[in-house]
């Protein structure tokens, strides 16, 4: 194949076929094993890869096979070592890029994974929250420690947060590489979203799925802009974006939780910044839990004890006057 582009049919086939090269399958989800016999068994197997975190498979001294935890490790080396192998030049390199980004997406999607066992038994009713979202079963820090509700929207927002961290790192690639790798990563996400809409949430009509996917795409684009603004303007702006997207602008939120997620993003971006290109290209990235950020955000800032200056008083006065005028 001499073409530099891939048709949509090729992409969809590769989405299902080039899995074993980059990761091991997870153990089956226990709750889905008890689904009705009348349900599609193939659908159950397709979700077994999300059952639990992937264990590290690094052996020997092979740096490319080492899975480093972004919340703990600080890999050494230059970003511009050998570069990613899937550079968008020919079809074979495109296939490598698709496989690597698929493995990276699986890592992002596993952070706040959820299941809805009732979706596989017509006799059971799926519970819903006050906004009408289907409530599933989820495990891990985002649900057990942070207290988020296991829904499609929660999974999507947490997954997009991790996708954003990788998207920022892809910007270090050459323009052609960056565009190709970002596109493949985003394609995997939206393919999975449509898949979940179908088997978990009963959206059998393509028109309904397309409408929801379009809305989700708009959220993704807006989230990129909000997080980018936060990286430039500081943690207060970044934390506000996290609050709106992850915590749905809940006014009763514990702001220490928002600070933990914000700190986690900063630490992850720092680790990715120092990671070599071959580490990214080999999909050897593992996201750790933000739980380790609790000790960081619990520390009192020295600036809190500093008396207010004239600039601070002016800013506070303008803020209070602005609230009165609303």
Image (tube, grey):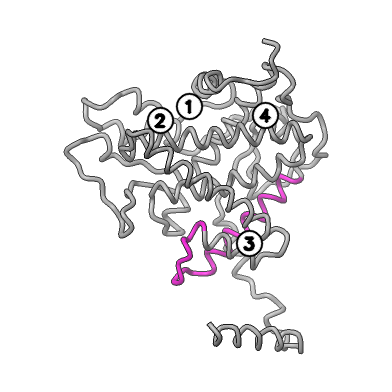
Disc number placed over residue 25 in the picture, else none: 1
Q: Earlier in the sequence, mark 1 or mark 4?
A: 1
Asked whether disc 3 touches disc 4, contact meaning CB atoms under 8 Å apart, the reply is no
Q: Earlier in the sequence, mark 1 or mark 2?
A: 1
Tag 3's secondary structure? Answer: helix
Quarter of image, res 108: top right
Q: Earlier in the sequence, mark 3 or mark 4?
A: 3
Q: CA distance from mark 2 to mark 3?
A: 34 Å
Asked whether disc 4 touches disc 2, contact meaning CB atoms under 8 Å apart, the reply is no
Asked whether disc 1 touches disc 2, contact meaning CB atoms under 8 Å apart, the reply is yes
Tag 4's secondary structure? Answer: loop
Q: Which residue is mark 3?
A: 238
Q: Does residue 41 show up magenta in the picture?
A: no
Disc number placed over residue 319 in the picture, else none: none
- Judged left or right of residue 226, residue 279 is right
The magenta stretch spans which residues? Answer: 245-273
- The percent position of residue 165, horizontal first and vertical second, equals 64, 47
Q: Is residue 63 above or below residue 253?
A: above
Mark 1 or 3: the one toward you: 3
Q: CA distance from mark 1 to mark 3?
A: 35 Å
Instruction: Tell me the residue at 62%/34% (across/down).
Output: 183
Q: Which residue is mark 4?
A: 282
Q: Does residue 269 show up magenta in the picture?
A: yes
Instruction: Tell me the residue at 56%/83% (across/down).
Output: 323
Tag 1's secondary structure? Answer: loop
């Amino acid at each position: 194949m001499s073409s530099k582009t891939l048709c949509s049919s090729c992409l969809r086939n590769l989405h299902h076929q080039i899995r074993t090269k980059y990761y091991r399958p997870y153990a089956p989800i226990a709750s889905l094993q008890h689904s009705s016999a009348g349900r599609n068994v193939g659908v159950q197997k397709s979700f077994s890869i999300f059952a639990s975190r992937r264990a590290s498979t690094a052996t020997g001294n092979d740096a490319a096979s080492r899975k480093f935890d972004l919340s703990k490790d600080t890999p050494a080396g230059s970003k511009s070592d050998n570069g990613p192998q899937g550079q968008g030049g020919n079809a074979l390199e495109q296939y490598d890029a698709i496989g690597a980004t698929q493995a990276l997406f699986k890592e992002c999607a596993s952070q706040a994974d959820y299941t809805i066992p009732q979706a596989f038994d017509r006799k059971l009713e799926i519970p819903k929250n006050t906004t009408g979202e289907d409530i599933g079963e989820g495990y891990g820090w985002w649900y057990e420690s942070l207290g988020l509700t296991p829904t499609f929207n929660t999974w999507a927002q947490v997954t997009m947060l991790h996708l954003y961290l990788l998207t920022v790192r892809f910007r270090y690639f050459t323009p052609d590489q960056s565009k190709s790798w970002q596109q493949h990563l985003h394609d995997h996400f939206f393919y999975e979203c449509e898949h979940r809409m179908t088997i978990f949430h009963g959206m059998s009509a393509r028109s309904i799925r397309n409408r929801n996917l379009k809305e989700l795409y708009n959220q993704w684009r807006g989230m990129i802009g909000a997080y980018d603004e936060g990286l430039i303007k500081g943690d207060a702006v970044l934390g506000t974006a996290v609050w709106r997207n992850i915590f749905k602008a809940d006014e009763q939120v514990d702001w220490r939780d928002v600070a933990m997620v914000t700190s986690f993003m900063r630490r992850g971006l720092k680790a990715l910044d120092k990671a070599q290109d071959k580490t990214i290209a080999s999909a050897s990235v593992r996201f750790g839990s933000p739980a380790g950020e609790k000790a960081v955000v619990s520390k009192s800032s020295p600036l809190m004890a500093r008396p207010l200056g004239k600039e601070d008083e002016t800013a506070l006065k303008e803020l209070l006057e602005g609230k009165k005028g609303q």
